[in-house]
Image (cartoon, rainbow, N blue to C red):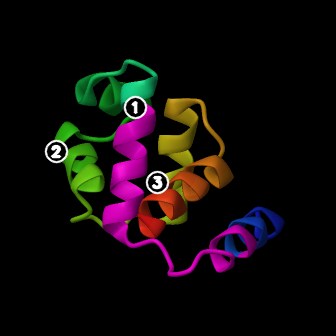
């Protein structure tokens, strides 16, 4: 687990500015849409409440590493890929 977090930190440190919760939310929404999943389906797959998923996507939630891992599993994407996409949103 620690090695996994270190990889994410290394990826994040390469950005011009650190991704915000809003950037992370945009990345989650983008991946979800690319996978053609509704917010409801993502909530079902992740075991999270649909309003919590909406909060993640809007950037109003501050997810734990565990929640991010759960969301990534539900989206069938690695955390590193999700962080890289959030960095893309951070760069504009």
Q: Relative to residue 25, is residue 54 drawn left or right?
A: left
Q: Calculate the distance from the C-alpha at mark 1 to the C-alpha at mark 3.
A: 15 Å
Residue at horizontal 47 percent and vertical 43 percent from the top: 71
* Residue 66 position within the rendered picture, expressed as x and y whole percent measured from the top left: 53, 57
Magenta span contains residue 29: yes
Residue at horizontal 31 percent and vertical 33 percent from the top: 43
- For the stretch drawn in magenta, the main secondary structure is helix
Residue at horizontal 35 percent and vertical 68 percent from the top: 21
The range drawn in magenta is 10-32
Which residue in the structure is indicated by mark 2?
Answer: 51
Report crowding for label 1: few under 14, some 14 to 19, many 20 or more residues within 10 A (C-alpha): many
Q: Secondary structure at mark 1?
A: helix
Report crowding for label 3: few under 14, some 14 to 19, many 20 or more residues within 10 A (C-alpha): some
Q: Secondary structure at mark 3?
A: helix
Q: Relative to residue 88, is residue 79 drawn left or right?
A: right
**Rendered image quadrant of residue 73:** top right
* Residue 60 position within the rendered picture, expressed as x and y whole percent measured from the top left: 21, 65
Q: Calculate the distance from the C-alpha at mark 3 to the C-alpha at mark 2.
A: 14 Å
Q: Relative to residue 72, is residue 29 drawn left or right?
A: left
Which residue in the structure is indicated by mark 3?
Answer: 67
Q: Secondary structure at mark 2?
A: helix
**Rendered image quadrant of residue 51:** top left
* Residue 36 position within the rendered picture, expressed as x and y whole percent measured from the top left: 38, 18
For the residue pair 76 and 69, the one nearer the viewer reads as 76
Which residue in the structure is indicated by mark 1?
Answer: 32
Could you tell me which quadrant the N terminus lies in?
Answer: bottom right
* Residue 63 position within the rendered picture, expressed as x and y whole percent measured from the top left: 40, 63
């Amino acid at each position: 687990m620690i090695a996994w977090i270190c990889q994410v930190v290394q990826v994040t440190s390469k950005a011009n500015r650190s991704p915000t919760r809003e950037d992370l939310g945009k990345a989650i929404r983008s991946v979800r849409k690319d996978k053609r999943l509704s917010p409801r389906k993502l909530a079902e797959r992740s075991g999270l409440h649909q309003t919590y998923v909406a909060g993640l996507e809007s950037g109003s939630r501050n997810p734990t590493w565990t929640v991010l891992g759960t969301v990534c599993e539900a989206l069938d994407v690695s955390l590193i890929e999700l962080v890289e996409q959030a960095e893309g949103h951070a760069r504009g």
